[in-house]
Amino acid sequence: MGIECLILDGKNLSLEQFVQSVRNGCKIMLSEESQARVVRARKAVDRALHDKKIIYGLTTGFGALSDVVISEEQTKQLQKNILMSHAAGVGNYLNEEAVRGALLLKINNLASGYAGIKLETLNTLVEMFNNRVHPLVPEKGSVGASGDLAPLAHIALVLIGQGKAVFAGRELQGKEAMKEAGIRIVDLEAGEGLALINGTQVMTAIGALTVYDALNLLKTADIAAGISLEVLLASNMELDKKIHEVRPHPGQIISADNLRRITKNSEIVSSHKDCSRVQDAYSIRCSPQVHGASIDAAHYARRVLEIEMNAATENPLIFSDTDQIISGGNFHGQPVALTMDFLAIALSEIANISERRIERLVNPHLSGLPAFLIKEAGLNSGFMIAQYTAAALVSENKVLSHPASVDSIPTSANKEDHVSMGTIAARKCREILKNAEIVVSIELLCAAQAMDLFTNLRAGVGTMEAYKLIRNHVSHMEEDRIVSEDINTMSELVRTGDILHAVEKKIGILN
């Protein structure tokens, strides 16, 4: 059962809570403690303004213009100006869940009480999230420091009645969207504009959604590998616990255990235990080692992203307990950038080894199965071109896996002379994940087609459940048909987790 309302305090948001709120429409509210912190921080800002202190972003310009002092009369105009001038994004709009994720993380970030924003402003953001007012945010334009300036500016524009947003399925001007949702627009005070756009919330939102889906895909990849192991008449000796205990990488142990449970009680595996084959190909034999390394990478990514989801990443930071306002660099997206580049490589490898298993399934010289898994090969091409598609996606992933984080280009007249490119890293990783989901889906289709040949032998407990679910949605291919339709159906079962849930319902939760 899902949570009905998520209480945010800026400190304890988990990956599961984040995804549930973003995808399942769970409403949010601020904790009483966080509200008190926000009020205290704003009072500290007001005291500093009253004392005529020169503070970056509150009484000065931004970036290379930080030496320009802004008069008290110009302070409100400065807030609008920063949102308008920094809303320089281009390209396609981010999808709804990425925008909802960024908005949720911005709220959680501000709830920590280090930004100096007014409670009224923060509550308006909460209303936008709960009423599903979704700003239209171009996906390109962030260099990842000072955080996600451009995309966050597009989100914040709607708060003041500018920009564009989707509400109730219609694209509207920001002012109209807020009016129809019954939300009052905000009159920003000193420092609030900067607080709204400083931070890593866009790259972190895309990254967190990707990590969550990656963890599920890795389990599904074990399911696909398990079916392939059976139909390619591979040995389960390579899954022996003793092998993996003497090389105790956590992910490797997890993957081997998953595969043992998935293929448990397989008559197909036991039917050839005395055959003459000495060793299986690496794409089968080393599945736990390869999958396991990617599992470890994904769990590392989860740890980093959950820290970032609950971090204060604006500048300056308001420490109300000591009445200090300190400028720093927490907006720099390097932790997220490196992590998403790492995860991108890990997911590329899952697709890579899956494609090699697909090749073994469709190649009669390697599998002993009918060519391209179809009757009357020649008249029919079967899954020949499905393997091409997998190969194309794997090759595309190799290009996308070049790390974004190794690049940097100076901005703001060289004041900001090293940037992270973290949002590019997150977006690339998301694309790699989508490609990997399709490759694993193609492996599942091919493995199910091969499984149809083993009518007199019982499959493993988990593989049988996966097979039955596939056949409930995709029939056996007797003769050529439009393959992309089957791939799309299978990809949806993988993306939604339906195939994973069917297997877990039978054998218990996979690790």
Image (cartoon, rainbow, N blue to C red):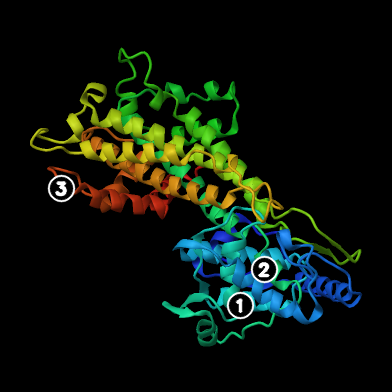
Q: Is residue 194 left or right of residue 248?
A: right
Q: Is residue 160 visible?
A: yes
Q: Which residue is mark 3?
A: 481
Q: Quadrant of residue 200?
A: bottom right
Q: Measuring 88% from the left and 70% from the top, which residue is drawn there?
A: 53
Pointer 1 and pointer 2: residues touching (CB < 8 Å)? yes
**Label 3 element class:** loop
Q: Which residue is mark 2?
A: 196
Q: Residues within 10 Å of mark 3 (few under 14, many from 20)?
A: few
Q: Amino acid at mark 2?
A: Leu
Q: Is residue 342 left or right of residue 333?
A: left
Could you say which is closer to the camera, residue 470 or residue 481? 481
Q: Residues within 10 Å of mark 1 (few under 14, many from 20)?
A: many
Measured Cα–Cα span from mark 1 to mark 2: 10 Å
Q: Which residue is mark 1?
A: 159
Q: Amino acid at mark 1?
A: Leu
Q: Of discs 3 and 2, which sits in the foreground?
A: 2
Q: Of discs 3 and 1, which sits in the foreground?
A: 1
**Label 2 element class:** helix
Q: Quadrant of residue 444?
A: top left
